Image: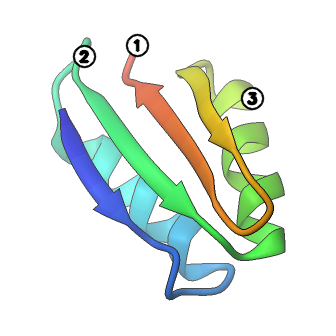
């Protein structure tokens, strides 16, 4: 599992970074991502679902969203 804290960044950087990381890992591997920006908290999970990746919300707190993304294709 790769862990990345993207809380210091605002959209679109977190979305772009997650997409680039997903290109580098193998099918079945996971990314644990922390997001704080309102746009990123909304857009990253939506795009990952749309792209067919597995996504699990670990924690959805006031200032931080923690998600695990599994590469499925």
Tag 1 and tag 2, C-beta contact below 8 Å: yes
Query: Which image quarter: residue 2?
Result: top left
> Which residue lies at the image location 45% right of the left edge and 72% below the top edge?
6
**Residue at the disc numbered 2:** 27
- In the picture, measured across the screen, residue 61 lies left or right of residue 17, that is right
Determine the secondary structure under disc 2: loop
- In the picture, measured across the screen, residue 12 lies left or right of residue 23, that is right
Q: Position of residue 33 (x, y in %)?
A: 43, 51
**Residue at the disc numbered 1:** 72
Residue 50: which disc? 3
Cα–Cα gap, marks 1 and 2: 5 Å
Q: Where is residue 71 in the image (x, y as percent from the top left)?
A: 37, 23
Q: Earlier in the sequence, mark 1 or mark 3?
A: 3
Relative to 66, does residue 37 appear above or below in the rendering? below
Crowd band around label 3 with a 10 angstrom C-alpha radius: few (<14), some (14–19), many (20+): few
In the picture as drawn, the residue positioned furthest to the front comes out as 62
The quarter of the picture where the C terminus appears is top left
């Amino acid at each position: 599992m790769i862990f990345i804290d993207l809380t210091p960044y605002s959209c679109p950087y977190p979305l772009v970074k997650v997409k680039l990381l997903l290109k580098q890992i193998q099918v079945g591997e996971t990314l644990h991502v922390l997001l704080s920006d309102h746009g990123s908290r909304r857009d990253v999970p939506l795009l990952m679902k749309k792209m067919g990746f597995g996504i699990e919300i670990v924690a959805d707190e006031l200032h931080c969203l923690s998600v695990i993304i599994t590469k499925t294709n």
